Image: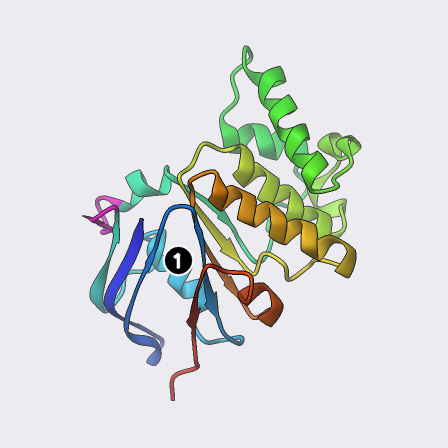
Amino acid sequence: MLEIKDATLIVNGKTLFNDLSFVALDQQVTCVYGGRGCGKTSLLEAFLGLRPVDSGYLTVDGELIDTLSAPFFRKQMAYVPQTFPFGTQRVSDLFEMLVGLKNDSTEYTQQQLLSQWRLLAIDKGHYDAVFNELPDDVQQRTLLSFAGVLTRQMILLDEPTRCQQPETWAMTVDYIKRLAEQGKVVLLTTSDENLARQANRLISFHLQE
C-alpha cells in the first residue's frame, strides 16, 4: 500500500499540489489524471523519495518514506519514466543491469522476459537491439515488460500509454491491469482520459493557481 497524507509540494516557488491525500492499494490500478505541468511526475518522484514534500508525509505499508528509508523502499518499486534516457545501451545489457542477473539465472530470466514480450507484441529479436534505435512505443512497452519481470511489489508508471499507437494501446492497458491482478500496487499518471477511465481509482490533478 502506498499512501500520501495532507501533502504539499512546492517547486521553484510554484505549488504543484496542496493538502493531497489518497491511498493506492494492492490489486488495484490507481490513476493520477491531469494535464501537463500539474505535478504528476513530481508526485511519483516524491513516492520514490527523490523529491521531499514540503508538508504532510508519504508511506509504504504504514512506514514513513524519508531520506533514510527511501533507498530501501526504492528496491521494492519498479519505475517506468515518461522519457527514456538510455542512450546506446543494448536492450539485453539494460535488462541484465536492471534485474541483476547472475550467470546461472540468465537463461531462465530471459525466458520470463520473452513471455512478457508475447503479451506486449514485442519481437524477440529486439533483445540484442540498441534501445534508442527502437520505435518509441516499443521502448515504452519494453520498459513496462521489465517491470513485469522484476519482483517488485509496487509499480510506478509515468504516462504509460503516451507513446502507444491505437493498435498497441489496448494491449498495454491490459498488461498494466494484469500487473495489478498479480497483487501489486500499480500507481500511474496520465493525461490520457481513456486510460484514466480504466483505473480502479482515479485522482484528478489540476494546475494550482
Residue occupying the point 33% across, 80% down: 13
Mark 1 surroundings: few (<14), some (14-19) or many (≥20) residues within 10 A: some
Residue at the farthest bottom position: 209
Q: What element does badge 1 sit on?
A: helix
Which residues, given as a range, are shown in magenta? 61-69
Quarter the C terminus occupies: bottom left
Can residue 67 be found in the magenta stretch?
A: yes
The rendered magenta stretch, by its main secondary structure, is classed as: loop
Q: Is residue 95 above or below residue 71?
A: above
Give residue 53's position: percent from left, percent from top.
27, 65
Q: How many marks?
A: 1
Q: Is residue 14 above or below residue 150?
A: below
Q: Is residue 12 above or below residue 87?
A: below
Residue occupying the point 37% across, 37% down: 75
Residue at the farthest top position: 104
Give residue 56's position: percent from left, percent from top.
20, 66
Asked whether residue 90 appears in the rendered view, the answer is no
Can residue 202 be found in the magenta stretch?
A: no
Name the residue tied to disc 1.
45
Give residue 42's position: percent from left, percent from top.
41, 64
Residue occupying the point 69% across, 36% down: 117
Q: How is the image coloured?
A: rainbow
Residue 131 relative to residue 144: left or right? right
Q: Nearer the viewer, residue 57 or 14?
A: 57
Amino acid, disc 1: Glu
Asked whether residue 181 appears in the rendered view, the answer is yes
Give residue 49's position: percent from left, percent from top.
32, 52
Residue occupying the point 76% across, 51% down: 135
Q: Nearer the viewer, residue 123 or 174?
A: 174
Q: Is residue 114 above or below residue 28?
A: above
